[in-house]
Image (cartoon, rainbow, N blue to C red):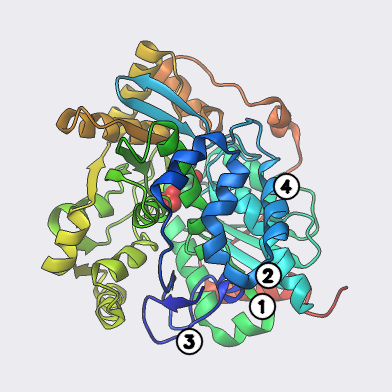
């Protein structure tokens, strides 16, 4: 499989290049040259497969020749063995036609593990084959960082630098990143917002000399491999509810648009998804964009669901690329506008194409608390605030289309956000045993100003250079 940049000015790349690069050199995101088709009878067969074998079938066409089949198979099996539920991503019914897809059974209790646990081995393999080392650099609003650290800690060929917004992630999220004793892990608290962290990381990647010298790799949700790996649970959960013979909709709590984009790709691959429901908290740039056609960046509001406190949804560029019928020059123009004016207008044609598949709902802070309380009271099911945003949007969608089942993605375990959950539901969620002692562990991190140059100096001083070690 070849990959192209959404901005059309970078050379095409193969899976290994895309894996290592994150961003394309022209600042665009990689998209596969074409989407494979999964036949209806293959979807029907999924409920009889393990998660790992479903994943193997679904991602093999994107990986192509890059990894031999048996090796890919054993990498996948090992990656998903770290999950504490035999189904990996089970579904639970919480109301009429309303289902929760539990994506929090991995090591860091958030859905990012589903992709990251596999990304670590994929990158280590690619680096070993080339005899190289690399620096993974990522910005996190909380969960990506923990998932990346968990996936890359102790690997031989990778140093990990994670930037998170100082004092804007939950205590547990921070401890999952800072209480790690691995010499290749570096956690940096930036005096700024998540968008500032993301802007620094983008700046590092666009500083080509630095990027090449340090061999930077991106693991943010702009990394294609993550989006690809996230298509799997759309298929497995829809098939468990009767797809392809019964259409379903998905409600997806959204920040960077990576997860819901994976749903769009699953649909493109042949999964009959009726509606893709974009669920945001008060940081509602995507809801406004889909309602009005104007994508306009505003100040970030801190909420109970910090992993969605994002104003620039990077993966939206991939959807724009498709909605513009892959006309990279249109995407370049829109992104140029965004960089200059902090906004752009989606044209009428692309907007109509987006609205044909997506609905979007915003859930405010009071509604989030009320949803946690209601689902606990009515169904005895404890939601974390991100998942509550999805359930709330799902209920709105069901009011319009009561006959289509909605699967709401539960992206974090409630114990990751114990204060918010306890305040809303009156019960305190407990951490699973493997994390029960987290509060007692020693923290290790550095605070840096919101300044790309400072971050470059920090990384250069700590990275093991290519070739410096075996
Ligand atoms: C990252 C994250 C999201 C948002 O996912 P995107 O792919 O950025 O849209 C939602 N919920 C939780 C718990 C997350 O960690």
In this orientation, which residue lies closer to the viewer: 100 or 337? 100
Q: Is residue 165 visible?
A: no
Which residue, given by chain and number where applicable, does mark 1 sit on?
215
Q: Residue at x 73, y 66 (%)?
A: 125
Residue 100 has which mark? none
Count of numbered circles on the image: 4
The one nearer the camera, 353 or 279, is: 353
The secondary structure type at the circle numbered 4 is: helix
Taking depth in this image into account, of 80 and 134 the one nearest to the observer is 80
Crowd tier of the residue under label 1, counting other residues whose Cα lies within 10 Å: few below 14, some 14–19, many 20 or above: many
- Gap between marks 3 and 1 measured at Cα: 18 Å
Tell me, yes or no, whether the two marked residues, 2 and 1, touch with CB atoms within 8 Å: yes
Question: Which of marks 4 and 3 precedes in the sequence?
Answer: 3
Question: At which x and y percent is residue 342?
Answer: 27, 69
Q: Secondary structure at mark 3?
A: loop
Place of residue 53 in the rendered image (x, y in percent of width and height, measured from the top left): 61, 46
Which of the labelled discs sits on residue 135, or is there none?
A: 2
Residue at (35, 54) in percent of width and height:
264
Name the residue: 33% across, 62% down: 316
Say which mark, if any, is on residue 78.
Answer: 4
């Amino acid at each position: 499989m070849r990959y192209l940049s959404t901005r059309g000015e970078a050379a095409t790349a193969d899976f290994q290049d895309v894996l290592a690069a994150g961003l394309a050199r022209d600042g665009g995101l990689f998209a596969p040259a074409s989407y494979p088709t999964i036949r209806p009878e293959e979807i029907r067969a999924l409920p009889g497969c393990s998660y790992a074998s479903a994943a193997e079938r679904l991602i093999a066409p994107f990986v192509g020749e890059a990894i031999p089949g048996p090796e890919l198979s054993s990498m996948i099996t090992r990656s998903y063995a770290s999950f504490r539920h035999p189904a990996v991503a089970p579904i639970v019914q919480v109301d009429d036609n309303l289902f929760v897809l539990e994506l929090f059974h991995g090591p860091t209790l958030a859905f990012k593990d589903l992709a990251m646990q596999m990304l670590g081995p994929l990158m280590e393999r690619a680096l070993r084959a080339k005899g190289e080392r690399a620096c993974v650099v990522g910005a996190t609003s909380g969960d990506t960082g923990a998932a990346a650290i968990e996936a890359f800690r102790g690997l031989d060929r990778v140093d990990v630098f994670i930037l998170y917004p100082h004092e804007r992630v939950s205590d547990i999220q921070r401890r999952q990143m800072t209480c790690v004793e691995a010499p290749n892990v570096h956690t940096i608290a930036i005096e700024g917002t998540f968008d500032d962290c993301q802007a620094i990381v983008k700046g590092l990647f666009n500083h080509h000399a630095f990027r090449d010298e340090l061999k930077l790799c991106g693991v943010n949700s702009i990394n294609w491999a993550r989006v690809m790996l996230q298509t799997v649970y759309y298929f497995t959960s829809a098939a468990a509810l009767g797809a392809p013979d019964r259409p379903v909709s998905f409600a997806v709590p959204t920040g960077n648009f990576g997860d819901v984009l994976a749903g769009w790709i699953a649909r493109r691959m042949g999964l009959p998804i009726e509606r893709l429901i974009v669920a945001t908290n008060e940081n509602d740039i995507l809801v406004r964009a889909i309602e009005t056609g104007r994508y306009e960046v505003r100040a970030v509001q801190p909420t109970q669901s910090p992993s969605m406190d994002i104003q620039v949804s990077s993966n939206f560029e991939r959807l724009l690329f498709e909605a513009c019928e892959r006309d990279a020059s249109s995407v370049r123009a829109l992104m140029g506008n965004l960089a200059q004016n902090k906004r752009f207008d989606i044209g009428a044609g692309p907007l109509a194409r987006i609205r044909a598949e997506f609905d979007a709902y915003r859930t405010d802070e009071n509604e989030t608390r009320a949803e946690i309380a209601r689902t606990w009271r009515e169904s005895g099911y404890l939601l974390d605030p991100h998942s509550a945003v999805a359930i709330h949007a799902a209920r709105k969608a069901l009011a319009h289309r009561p006959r289509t089942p909605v699967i709401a993605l539960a992206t974090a375990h409630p114990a990751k956000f114990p204060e918010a959950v306890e305040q809303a539901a009156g019960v305190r969620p407990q951490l699973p045993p493997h994390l029960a002692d987290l509060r007692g562990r020693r923290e290790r991190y550095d605070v840096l100003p919101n300044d790309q140059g400072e971050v470059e100096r920090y990384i250069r001083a700590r990275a093991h250079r290519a070739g410096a070690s075996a």
